[in-house]
Image: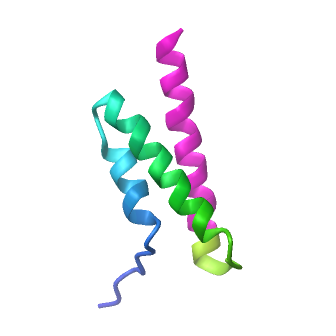
Amino acid sequence: MCRPKVYSWQIPYVVAILETDDTQRCRQVYEAMAAIDQRRKDPVNGDEGLALAEAETGLQILISEAIARCD
């Protein structure tokens, strides 16, 4: 069986997505964003490029939801 590749930046991303404590989630989102930004410093293409784009969208949704809760 072929396992999907796990990229190092995906671990902090998944931690941020799964976090349920709002105060912890903020820190986790920043850590995930930093990991993604670090990865983007080198050329990215193919499946990883698509995964990065989807992760960035997911983080933007989390941020938007957090802002909406503050209103």
Q: Residue furthest top?
A: 71
Most frequent secondary structure within the magenta stretch: helix
Count of picture labels: 0
Q: Is residue 53 left or right of residue 67?
A: right
Quadrant of the image for the N terminus?
bottom left
Q: Quadrant of the C terminus?
A: top right
Q: Return the x and y of residue 67 as percentages of the image width and height.
A: 54, 21
Q: Please, which colouring scheme is shown?
A: rainbow
Q: Which residues are magenta?
A: 50-71
Identified at 55% across, 37% down, the residue is 61
Q: Residue at image x 46%, y 44%?
A: 29
Q: Which residue shows up at 65% across the image and 80% down it?
A: 46
**Where on the picture, by quarter, is residue 37?**
bottom right
For the residue pair 18 and 27, the one nearer the viewer reads as: 27
Q: Is residue 65 above or below residue 46?
A: above
Q: Is residue 43 left or right of residue 29?
A: right
Q: In the picture shown, does residue 40 fall above or below 58?
A: below
Q: Is residue 64 covered in magenta?
A: yes
Q: Quadrant of residue 6?
A: bottom left
Asked if residue 52 lies in the magenta stretch, the reply is yes
Q: Residue at x 28, y 34 (%)?
A: 20
* Front residue of 38 and 20: 38
Measuring from the top left, give residue 10's x and y in whole percent.
43, 64
As drawn, which residue projects farthest toward the bottom? Answer: 1
Give the image location of residue 2, x and y in percent: 35, 89
In percent of width and height, residue 39 lies at 59, 70
Indicate the quadrant where residue 42 lies: bottom right
